[in-house]
Image: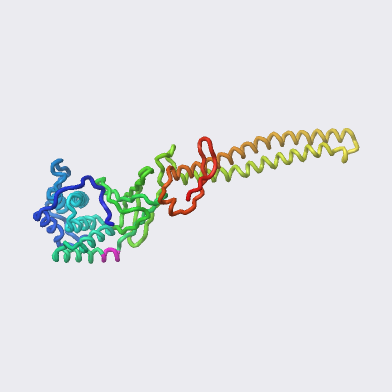
Amino acid sequence: MLPSFRRLASGGSRLSTGALTVVALTLSLSAPAQAQSPAPAPAQCPDYISPDQQHDARILTMHGVSCFEARDFERALHYYMRAYAQSPEPLLRGAIGRSLHELGIYGPARQYYQDYLDSPAADASGAQRIRERIDQLDATLAEDAATLEVRSTPPGARAHLVLENGEWFELGQTPVKTRVREGTYEVALTREGYQTRQMQARVHANAPTSVEPILVADAAAFDISAAGWRRGALWTLATSVPVAAAGTAMLVLSAQDTEAARDAARHYDDPGELERRRIELLERSDSLRTWGTATTAVGAAGLITGVVLYLSANRLASPGGDPAEDAQAGVRVQPELGANHIGVRVRF
């Protein structure tokens, strides 16, 4: 499946022969994609077209050519993609690939090039030019292209590159890997039921770069991730266990001192010494019991809080469940905490 640009229009008219000729002129530019000399006086590249022209594939294509000649490749891509949405002519796929090539989005560019060549409607001269572009692109891919891999938690999000003009070019569903020119890119991820996430990724030539953001469910009460909740839960549990253990140890020592006070008569014959020892043991027992009770209560409260946070994280990570993912997972046991229940959910 071809990567797609976020579409603003659909439907529409077929391209005229004149418009296809204009696209062919764009494809016939002879300079290499990455070694063009500075452009002469730039052609007019409109940043706005009237509503009555927004569904005219011929006009959209001509604007794409004007923007390409003005070296505004992002806007050229915008017009070509909108024209293709109205009239999916094979030659426009080549024009889209050429714009992506200039923008350094190499993986999708090659895919659009190849899609044009695979089209029965590809003409001989256009196919030859596209093959030349593919040869140039393959040389770039072999020498200094960078690899960008986009993952997400949970997987299955739609990954996009955010262009400088603010529009998004879709790479595909995570996990997805593509080849691009070295540089810094803004990546946006969307998934139904989750908040949109955007981040920057710096990629280097001949080196893989991977980004894996954590998506936050729309149902989340706070803008933190389920993984963050789990980390907080584990830290809470880890710090609460020794506190609870220390409190328990003090309670055990308190009980031992109380028992020792009862048995003191076996070890002391002097009544004064016996009374002094009993008072000492009972005072220490009372002190240990007080501190042990407080410390154990704090530790137990921390343990309960950690368990609640962990179960809440599972709830946050799967706000409504994904039947497709559940089907792939087979039998799935998930702890669950609700307003008036606690337990586990078993999904088949």
274 with respect to 129 (left or right): right
Comparing 157 with 149, the one in front is 157
Give the vertical position of 211 relative to 235 (above or below).
below
- The residue lying furthest to the front in this view is 348
- Provide the major secondary structure of the magenta segment: helix
43 with respect to 33 (left or right): left
Is any atom of residue 66 visible in this view? no
Quarter of the image containing the N terminus? Answer: bottom left
148 with respect to 313 (left or right): left
How many numbered circles are shown? 0
Give the vertical position of 291 relative to 158 (above or below).
above
Residue shown at 51%/43% (left/top)?
336
Give the vertical position of 78 relative to 262 (above or below).
below
Magenta residues span 138-143
Residue shown at 29%/51% (left/top)?
170
In magenta stretch: residue 224: no
Residue shown at 13%/41% (left/top)?
52
Expressed as whole percent of the image width and height from the top left, the position of residue 169 reads 27, 51
Is any atom of residue 191 visible in this view? yes
On the image, which quarter does residue 249 sit in? top right
- The residue lying furthest to the left in this view is 18
Expressed as whole percent of the image width and height from the top left, the position of residue 311 reads 52, 43
On the image, which quarter does residue 250 sit in? top right
Expressed as whole percent of the image width and height from the top left, the position of residue 186 reads 32, 49
Expressed as whole percent of the image width and height from the top left, the position of residue 241 reads 61, 44
Residue shown at 30%/63% (left/top)?
144
- The residue lying furthest to the right in this view is 269
